[in-house]
Amino acid sequence: MLVLSRKIGEKIIIDDEIEIVIIDSNQSSVKLGVNAPKSVSVYREELYKEIKNTNKISNTTSFDALNELQNLIHPDTQKSSVIEKFTAKVNDDKK
């Protein structure tokens, strides 16, 4: 980890396109300004972790949820056929 000391108004430049400016400082906190291209995502750590966790959860699908969805869409259809089709599709996508 690189540790730097900066005063209010001083900057840190990362990779020629990200600029971090010290806006304010006191004994318990530092205010930073970040100038970065729109293609670069900048998050507070706690928000970043929440986004990652939510994305991870959204990528998991349970068979119970599939069965519930199946019953809502086509209550008369055999449950196993939908699960078999989904499982085959997931397996094909992994290849």
Image (spheres, rainbow, N blue to C red):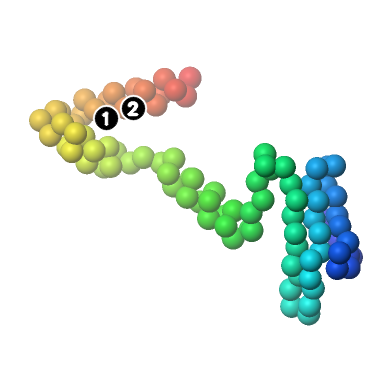
Residue drawn at 27 percent across, 37 percent down? 66
Q: Quadrant of residue 43?
A: bottom right
Image location of residue 33, percent across then percent down: 75, 59
The image's mark for residue 15 is none
Outermost residue, left side:
76
**Residue identified by numbered label 1:** 83
Image location of residue 52, percent across then percent down: 54, 49
Name the amino acid, label 1.
Ile
Classed neighbour count for the residue bearing mark 1: other residues with Cα under 10 Å, few (<14), some (14–19), many (≥20): some
Q: Secondary structure at mark 1?
A: helix
Name the amino acid, label 2.
Thr
Residue drawn at 32 percent across, 27 percent down? 86
Horizontally, is 38 left or right of 61 in the view? Answer: right
Up-down relation of residue 67 to residue 90 (above or below): below
Up-down relation of residue 11 to residue 18 (above or below): below
Alpha carbon separation for disc pair 1 and 2 = 6 Å
Outermost residue, bottom side:
27
Quarter of the picture containing the N terminus is bottom right
**Residue identified by numbered label 2:** 87
Q: Quadrant of residue 31?
A: bottom right
Front-most of residues 13 and 53: 13
Front-most of residues 14 and 80: 14
Q: Secondary structure at mark 2?
A: helix
